Image: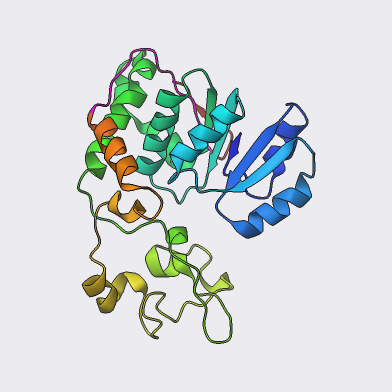
Amino acid sequence: MDVGCSTGMTTLIMARRFKKVVGLDIAPLALIEARKTCPNENAQFLEIDGLLAKEQVVEIALDNKATGIWVDIGGNRELDTVVLFLWYLLRHLPHVALICKSETLYKAARTSELRMENECAGVRWFPELVSECAQRQMGKNRLAHPQQYPLKTREDGLPICRFHNYDICKKKEDCPYDHTMCHFCLMLGHRARDCTKMKSEIPVGSYRAKRNHHKKKHQIAEEEEEEEEIARPDDVAVVAVGDDGGEGDL
């Protein structure tokens, strides 16, 4: 499986080596390109945000008898989200090889005080980080990931940039989307994160509350219960791979 397959370059490499490959990505346009890049009959592409719909990722892995999962996550996803997603996969797919490319996780691996103090810290480093991330997420207020907000356009059809409105648009002046209009109220002169109408109508709740449209109520309750009972096994080893190809030697 290729979680975060984008335009399918890595999926193509995998399709040449495995009997079946499933690519997941949140961007419809990227998936269109992925199907062109990797037209192989043994490759399948699905529009899913794995980080928010991790139960679906597990179901797909089990249905397809996956033996390995390659997780390619952009650097704009925060550490807590990445770590809790990987932890969920480790717990529910213990016999599946899991490799992750994430800037945030790579940096955490390189700067971990525990890793520096103890040469055997690779055994405990990741579970310790999971506990820290879970604690931060409980009751933490923040906006959802920009791509989780619906696509909106101006009257002329130009999309309004969600990253500019809810986070930071790294493309800045090179961004082809509108940076002048609020994505929430569609007024000029401010961003959605500064919109008084949005703050009054939709109080920013916890991270989990922002995912209600992705999950049923009983699924949310089940996840909360699991996070409270996070275990710390002594047999977890993690390799974090950075975009430069370097590895945290854990």
- At a point 56% along the width and 70% down the height, the residue shown is 175
According to the image, what is the colour scheme of the structure?
Answer: rainbow
Check the picture and name the quadrant holding the N terminus: top right
**In this rendering, position of residue 16 left or right of residue 73:** right
Percent coordinates x, y for residue 63 in the rendering: 58, 30
**Toward which corner of the image does residue 62 lie, by quadrant?**
top right
**In this rendering, position of residue 77 left or right of residue 232:** right
Tell me, yes or no, whether the highlighted magenta stretch contains residue 122: no
Instruction: Answer whether residue 133 is visible to the viewer in this image.
Output: no
**Between 85 and 78, the one nearer to me in the picture:** 85
Magenta-highlighted residues: 229-242
- At a point 41% along the width and 75% down the height, the residue shown is 183
What secondary structure characterizes most of the magenta part? Answer: loop
Percent coordinates x, y for residue 221 in the rendering: 27, 40
Percent coordinates x, y for residue 120 in the rendering: 36, 13
**Toward which corner of the image does residue 81 lie, by quadrant?**
top left
